[in-house]
Amino acid sequence: MQRPASRVLRVLRENAKKGRPCLSVAVIAGLVRLTPSEVRAVVEELEIKGLARINGDHVCYTGALDRVEEVFLGPLISRVMERIRSRRDIVYRAEEVKGSVPFVDIVIARRDGIIFLVRLVRGEPPERLVAIARKLAKVSRRVAEGKEELPIGRLTPRIIVPVLVSEHGAPRIIEGVVFKPAEKLIELVLNPWPEINHPLTRVYRVH
């Protein structure tokens, strides 16, 4: 990594060890002597490597965390994930992936081969959500094309569905990507067909 990225990563790691995994962009900029916009650019590089995440004005270090959702959405997403995992009749696997799939936080695989690539978001301005949705869609297309591997064992994927998930907010479509509040994620997993068949939704079929 370039030197600015190394400095930002070192600051994040040191603070994570002290029990402060998240710092504001302004604080990081002051500590590493970069502008806020430079810090955001560096974090985008670290996000691809699965080492950091930016949520609104805060950057969180993910490399030292046991469960990614506890930093971004707290216990709510944990409860939702447990409910999803309990539906073994439908769900083959549901895991936090922490960087093994670029730009993806959670992979949920149905037994019929429908795969949800979930990105957790919180407090993002509209233009940032649009940018995140586009990146997530690009990753989903790469997965469907076989250019990115998924941690789903021997299951054969058929359809890749990118999904943005937040604690709250109205269900909607952002740049073709499904957006759901956390409590609605299980409904999507159990009955994905309304979204998959929606003419504006981006889904990627594996050939």
Image: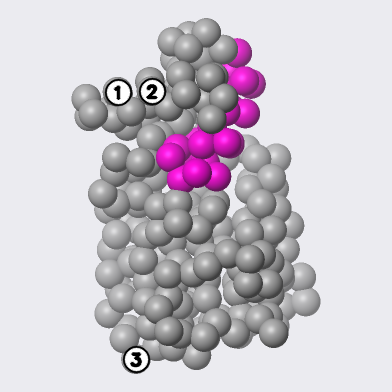
The x and y percentages for residue 91 are 39, 82
Q: Is residue 50 magenta?
A: yes
Q: Is residue 85 in sight in this rendering? A: yes
Give the residue at x 34% y 91%.
Answer: 89
- Extent of the magenta region: 35-55
Q: Is the C-beta separation of discs 2 and 1 under 8 Å?
A: yes
Q: CA distance from mark 3 to mark 2?
A: 44 Å
Quadrant in which the C terminus is drawn: bottom right
Q: Is the C-beta separation of discs 3 and 2 under 8 Å?
A: no
Type of the residue with mark 3: Asp
The x and y percentages for residue 29 are 51, 14
The residue carrying mark 2 is 10
Secondary structure under tag 2 reads helix
The residue carrying mark 1 is 14
Give the residue at x 58% y 64%.
Answer: 148
Q: CA distance from mark 2 to mark 1?
A: 6 Å
Quadrant in which the N terminus is drawn: top right
Give the residue at x 77% y 76%.
Answer: 199
Secondary structure under tag 3 reads loop
Q: Would residue 73 be found to the left or right of residue 46 on screen?
A: left
- How packed mark 1 is, by other alpha carbons closer than 10 Å (few <14, some 14-19, many 20 or more), is few
Q: Is residue 177 in sight in this rendering? A: no
Type of the residue with mark 1: Glu
The x and y percentages for residue 119 are 51, 55
Q: Nearer the viewer, mark 3 or mark 2?
A: 2
- Identify the main secondary structure in magenta: helix
Query: Which label number is shown at residue 78?
Result: none
Query: Which label number is shown at residue 89?
Result: 3
The quarter holding residue 82 reads: bottom left
**Which of marks 2 and 3 precedes in the sequence?**
2
